[in-house]
Image (tube, grey):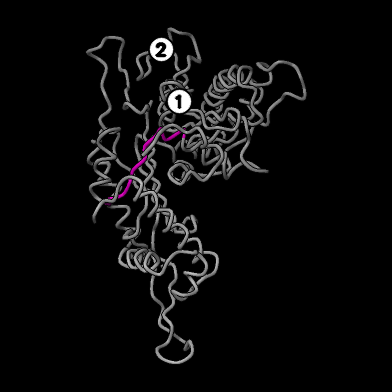
Amino acid sequence: MTQITGAHSLLRRSHEERIMRALREHGALSRAELRERVKLSRTTTSEITANLLERRAIISLTPSERAGRGRPAERLAIDPEAGQVIGIDFSHARVRVSVADASHEIMASGKLEYGTETTWAERASVAFALLESLQESTGVHFDSLNAIGIGFPGPFSEKGARLALGRDNKDTIALEGARELPKLFRQRFDAPVTIDNNSRLAGLGEAIWGSEGGAPKHLIYLRLDQGVGGALVVDGSLATGAFGHAGEIGHTVAVHPNGKTCRCGKRGCLETVASVPAVLAACAEKGLVLEGLEELAGAVQREDPVVGTVLHEVGDAVGRVLGGLAVVVDPSEIVVGGALMAVAPQILDYVKAAIRYQLIPIPEAAPVVRTAALGDDAGARGAIAAVLRRSSLLERYSVEP
């Protein structure tokens, strides 16, 4: 496909969006009706619709009635099976994808797991296989793909991602995935790619779709999963920070600074206490060996006392970190989500208790503290929102495709 750049590209996308919007709002239209709706010339309308037909973004319906004399009027409509945007959330151990159509509704989603040592090229291949599987099972196709959003599991900035394994430079490893993933997806789909921290995107998804009454102006989001990450909404905008690392709540020291070593190189980070691996390790240290989330969920359901003790410690640590942050940010909502919360929702009670202790005792300033409303697809949905710029939260969003 020929790449169109610069002002011509922007103008073409604007024309395409006008045509797609008209078809979304009014259904199937003849070319003459479409020209009347979008106020474009016959030549421009013909050129844009021909390209959209070639990309299978729209389809030509079999004429069912005549428009006066002569041949029946051809009618154009959005292809109901055309995936327009893909949102992808890579975690340390699984990939989740969601596909949105031209009306920005989710039309397909799924996930696949991989080992934590899997290379980024292999993780991309897993995502490609998942998308192919969705094509086969749902009929969705990606010929008219407009954009791809990718959530990356680690500290992220426009200059790349870094994960420090120690204080020494020789122990600091650059995560090549931040540079490799966009390249691989552009090569595969020939579409623009945006990449950002996956927990920040999950927080964006939660702020847009999870909050009653619309997106809040001030929100703290924390995700307890294979790692621990977060997002901040400050003054109505998703915060990325001066260097792109805003929301890295998991690397806030939550216990004694001589606590367990975190993969970031520090000691006592919240991630060493509240991530899924940390919880499983803490249970094992107390004599209860559990293999993964499924067994942890079973132990929670049977109210195992060891698990109860560990979860209380987790909730207390999370609440102390979030409470301290709330004193600074003054949010209207604090949201805790992720795989750990899904299997152990009672953590929220301990979190609330610790937050109440941390807050300034002003009743009207107390934020709502709740469990995330969205499930495991929050990051993928947030990635879709980010590439579409579908929320006022993204007005000052600085990570560009």
Q: Looking at this view, is 156 or 355 the one in front?
A: 156
Q: Is residue 286 visible?
A: no
Identity of the residue drawn at 44% across and 58% down:
101
Q: Looking at this view, is 11 or 228 the one in front?
A: 11
Q: Callout 1: few (<14), some (14-19), or many (20+) C-alpha neighbours within 10 Å?
A: many
Residue 219 at x, y percent in the picture: 60, 30
Residue 380 at x, y percent in the picture: 43, 44
Identity of the residue drawn at 47% across and 42% down:
382
Relative side of 231 to 136, left or right: right
Relative side of 34 to 59, left or right: right
Q: Which residue is mark 2?
A: 267
Query: Residue farthest to the right?
Result: 363
The stretch drawn in magenta includes residue 196: yes
Element type where label 1 sits in the image: helix
Which image quadrant is residue 206 in?
top right
Q: Quadrant of the N terminus?
A: bottom left
**CA separation, marks 2 and 1?**
20 Å
Q: Is residue 137 above or below residue 60?
A: above
Residue 218 at x, y percent in the picture: 62, 29
Q: Quadrant of the C terminus?
A: top left
Element type where label 2 sits in the image: loop
Q: Is residue 365 above or below residue 79?
A: above
Residue type at tag 2: Arg
Q: Which residue is mark 1?
A: 283
Q: Earlier in the sequence, mark 2 or mark 1?
A: 2
Magenta part of the chain: 189-200
Identity of the residue drawn at 65% across and 22% down:
330
